[in-house]
Image (tube, rainbow, N blue to C red):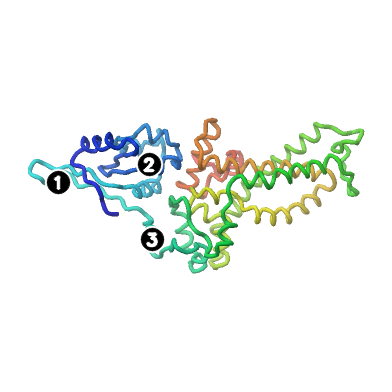
């Protein structure tokens, strides 16, 4: 990256900051960065950066007690480099050479450059994944980059279906959950289970407590499914076959999110895929829980899923004010930028604690 500005001293840098109040500028090891466009995407929230605006953040950056940063974070920072502070002695010689940290991977408007391969940003990424081997693919998804948009498909039709704003999830699944609950409370099914008499409104044994407990059990089962899916399906890394189709499917399901964690329209599970999974999963639920029980259980499971996706969106793109969500934002970002083989929980750490994958 070509340096556009050279400051002769920190005082000159401060003067430049005063003359450009709309810019958020910081210094790291005498390198100058304009992080204005990164404010809303900073995992620790914009306030943390604003508190250190126009300052040297070298010590702060490596102070884990204040806010932990990974090597990936440092490489991402260098994307925003605009210049250096080059101090000189009276004889004109450089007092100290500015330490260089290379941005990796290198990103231009046309491509992402990795060590052994590159990705063409003018084309869809999915067709290019088909040409990668597993080593290249894993290298790509384990070196996250900061982009707000990246094309997945060459086809405009497929590309449109790949982008899913957060509000589509509650719009699709809340009506499904309410309809299933209505069925569970009012329909008289031929394949009665032993608990159905407590769930049917017109039954003399009907109990709201039974309805609430069944609904809550659905949410509880979702939390386990959330962990199991994230760990066993989304992070099916080691057993993943070194085959183009396997890498392609993995990339669509979860790899794209680890490659570009801050893409807002690829954080939720695509509704089309969701409907396919639902069409396969619901018959299994009705077989395990015949009659009314499955129709009261399933809304809890669906609400749990909606809360999961909304939490995922929130901790990536919002500044939490509830302490639990603040902690989950920090925790999930460590999953992305520190260790992708731990910290699978999104809504809580419960199952990470149970199965020994908690990340401290």
Mark 1 crowd level (few <14, some 14–19, many ≥20, 10 Å Cα): few
Would residue 265 be found to the left or right of residue 20 on screen? right
Q: Give coordinates of residue 315: x percent, y percent.
A: 53, 40
Q: Give coordinates of residue 251: x percent, y percent.
A: 54, 59
Which of discs 2 and 1 lies nearer the camera? The answer is 2
The answer to which of marks 2 and 3 sits earlier in the sequence is: 2
The answer to which of marks 2 and 1 sits earlier in the sequence is: 2
Q: Which mark is residue 211?
A: none
Which residue extends farthest left?
Answer: 91
Residue to which mark 1 is pinned: 94
Q: Nearer the viewer, residue 343 or 126?
A: 126
* Contact, mark 1 vs mark 3 (Cβ under 8 Å): no
Q: Quadrant of the N terminus?
A: bottom left
Q: Nearer the viewer, residue 166 or 255?
A: 166
Residue to which mark 3 is pinned: 113
Write the residue at 40% across / 36% down.
Answer: 64
Write the residue at 40% across / 42% down.
Answer: 69
Q: CA distance from mark 2 to mark 3?
A: 24 Å
The answer to which of marks 1 and 3 sits earlier in the sequence is: 1
Q: Nearer the viewer, residue 130 or 108?
A: 108
**Helix, strand or loop for disc 2:** helix
Would residue 39 be found to the left or right of residue 270 on screen? left
**Helix, strand or loop for disc 3:** strand
Mark 3 crowd level (few <14, some 14–19, many ≥20, 10 Å Cα): some
Residue to which mark 2 is pinned: 36
Q: CA distance from mark 1 to mark 3?
A: 32 Å
Write the residue at 28% across / 43% down.
Answer: 32
Q: Give coordinates of residue 133: x percent, y percent.
A: 48, 67
């Amino acid at each position: 990256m070509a340096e556009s500005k050279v400051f002769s001293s920190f005082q000159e840098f401060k003067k430049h900051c005063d003359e450009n109040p709309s810019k958020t500028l910081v210094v790291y090891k005498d390198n100058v960065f304009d992080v204005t466009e990164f404010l809303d995407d900073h995992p620790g929230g914009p306030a943390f950066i604003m508190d250190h605006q126009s300052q040297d953040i070298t010590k702060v950056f490596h102070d884990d007690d204040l806010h932990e940063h990974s090597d990936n974070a440092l490489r991402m920072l260098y994307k925003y480099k605009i210049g250096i502070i080059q101090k000189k002695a009276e004889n004109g010689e450089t007092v100290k050479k500015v330490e260089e940290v290379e941005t990796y991977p290198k990103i231009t408007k046309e491509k992402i450059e990795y060590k052994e391969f590159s990705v063409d940003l003018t084309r869809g990424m999915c067709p290019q994944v088909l040409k990668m081997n597993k080593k290249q693919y894993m290298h790509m998804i384990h070196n996250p980059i900061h982009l707000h948009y990246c094309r997945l498909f060459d086809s405009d039709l497929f590309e449109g279906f790949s982008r899913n704003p957060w509000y589509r999830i509650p719009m699709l699944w809340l009506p499904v959950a309410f309809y299933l609950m209505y069925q569970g409370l009012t329909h008289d099914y031929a394949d009665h289970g032993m608990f159905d008499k407590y769930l049917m409104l017109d039954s003399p044994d009907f109990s709201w407590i039974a309805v609430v407990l069944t609904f809550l059990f659905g949410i509880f089962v979702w939390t386990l499914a959330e962990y199991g899916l994230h760990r066993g399906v989304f992070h099916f890394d080691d057993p993943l076959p070194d085959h183009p189709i396997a890498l392609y499917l993995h990339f669509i399901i979860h790899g794209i999110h680890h490659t570009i964690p801050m893409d807002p329209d690829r954080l939720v599970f695509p509704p089309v895929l969701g409907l396919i999974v639902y069409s396969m999963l619901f018959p299994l639920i009705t077989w395990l829980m015949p009659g009314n029980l499955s129709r009261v259980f399933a809304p809890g499971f669906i609400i749990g899923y909606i809360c999961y996706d909304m939490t995922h969106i929130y901790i990536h793109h919002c500044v939490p004010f509830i302490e639990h969500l603040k902690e989950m934002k920090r925790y999930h970002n460590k999953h992305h930028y520190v260790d992708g083989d731990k910290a699978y929980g999104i809504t809580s750490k419960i199952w990470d604690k149970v199965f020994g994958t908690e990340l401290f």
